Image (spheres, rainbow, N blue to C red):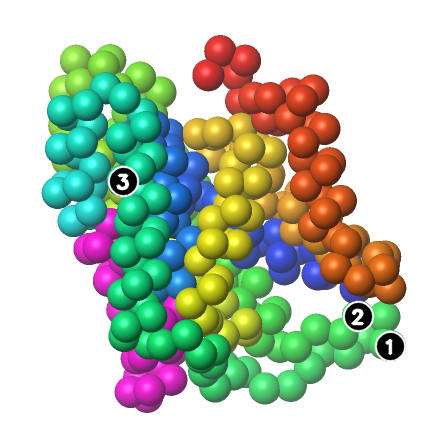
């Protein structure tokens, strides 16, 4: 039981971070960013390059990943999504753009880094062992703590900073925020950059545990969409709840159903479909959107 609880917290914290960036972009711009998983992979490869190849301290490599993805996100919003949203009222336009970006990032990653699995040295060696009831490597404990601190910092930033309040106003009512003096164009760019930065941050953290490879982008995006739909599209607290729920479902499934092979996600998908049929707006979403 202790092992399942620890694994659920560890998985839930990282999944919540992945979902936060996606739901923030959706809340601000009504854009389903299908390239979010590829941004996560890019963050992992940036950390791999600076930490694993160039020998930078892990903290500096992680900071480089955050800055790189934030700049990339800002450029994508300003020169791609903003013109499309301004010139087209069809949501399909942004969806196709996001899907195209996902394929573009996959091609760039393949050209630059290849398709092989890449790993980096552990941040901390050793394993925590509590009477064989709870076994957890110290690096996973550290990554879990950093993920939780990042989520708390993000919540405090959104709640108390001027930028965070402007982003929340923009997410609640774009037109009303503009009438109240919020620079919609600037804060849309900041929000997209922040969402991309969160993807780069979690990618940089998890490269030390799982490594990184070309094929991780698609499955990561699928998991992120699952978490957003569980919690409620565009609801930040819902994304956190969805991440925690998915983390515990995976931890319980892997512990209980491991003898039946790779059936855990089949049951999770079936459960999600049943849940959405009953409550399509998610746990914290409103029925009207």
- Circle 1/circle 2 CB separation < 8 Å: yes
Q: Is residue 247 left or right of residue 201?
A: right
Q: Nearer the viewer, residue 94 or 153?
A: 94
Q: Nearer the viewer, residue 283 or 225?
A: 225
**Bounds of the magenta span?**
44-73
Which circle marks residue 248 in the picture?
none
> Residue 87's spot in the image, x, y percent?
14, 24
Magenta highlight on residue 26: no
> Residue 280's spot in the image, x, y percent?
60, 21
List the residue tagged with mark 3: 97
Distance between the Cα atoms at labels 3 and 2?
45 Å
Say few, some or many: other residues with alpha carbon within 10 Å of mark 3 (under 14 / 14 to 19 / 20 or more). some
List the residue tagged with mark 2: 134
Distance between the Cα atoms at labels 1 and 3?
52 Å
Q: Is residue 250 left or right of residue 182?
A: right
Q: Quadrant of residue 166?
A: top left
Predominant SS of the magenta segment:
helix
Q: Quadrant of residue 116?
A: bottom left
Q: Residue at x 76, y 44 (%)?
A: 267
> Residue 165's spot in the image, x, y percent?
30, 30
Q: Secondary structure at mark 3?
A: helix
List the residue tagged with mark 1: 131
Say few, some or many: other residues with alpha carbon within 10 Å of mark 2 (under 14 / 14 to 19 / 20 or more). some
């Amino acid at each position: 039981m202790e092992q399942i609880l620890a694994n659920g917290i560890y998985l839930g914290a990282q999944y919540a971070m992945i979902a936060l960036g996606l739901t923030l972009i959706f809340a601000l711009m009504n854009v389903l960013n299908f390239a979010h998983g590829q941004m996560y992979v890019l963050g992992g490869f940036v950390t791999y390059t600076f930490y694993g190849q160039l020998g930078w301290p892990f903290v500096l490599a992680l900071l480089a990943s955050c800055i790189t993805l934030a700049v990339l996100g800002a450029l994508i919003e300003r020169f791609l999504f903003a013109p499309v949203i301004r010139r087209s009222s069809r949501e399909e336009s942004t969806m196709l753009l996001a899907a195209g970006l996902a394929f573009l990032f996959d091609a760039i990653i393949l050209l630059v880094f290849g398709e092989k699995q890449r790993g980096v040295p552990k941040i901390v060696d050793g394993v925590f062992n509590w009477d064989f009831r709870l076994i957890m490597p110290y690096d996973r404990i550290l990554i879990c703590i950093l993920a939780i601190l990042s989520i708390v910092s993000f919540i405090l930033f959104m709640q108390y900073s001027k930028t965070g309040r402007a982003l929340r106003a923009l997410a609640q009512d774009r037109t009303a925020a503009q009438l109240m003096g919020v620079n919609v164009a600037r804060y849309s760019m900041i929000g997209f950059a922040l969402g991309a930065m969160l993807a780069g941050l979690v990618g940089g953290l998890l490269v030390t545990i799982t490594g990184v490879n070309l094929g991780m982008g698609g499955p990561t995006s699928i998991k992120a969409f699952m978490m957003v739909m569980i919690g409620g599209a565009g609801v930040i607290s819902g994304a956190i709840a969805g991440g925690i729920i998915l983390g515990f479902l995976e931890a319980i499934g892997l512990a209980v159903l491991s003898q039946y092979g790779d059936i855990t996600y089949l049951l999770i998908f079936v459960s999600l479909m049943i849940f959405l049929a009953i409550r399509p707006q998610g746990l914290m979403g409103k029925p009207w959107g």
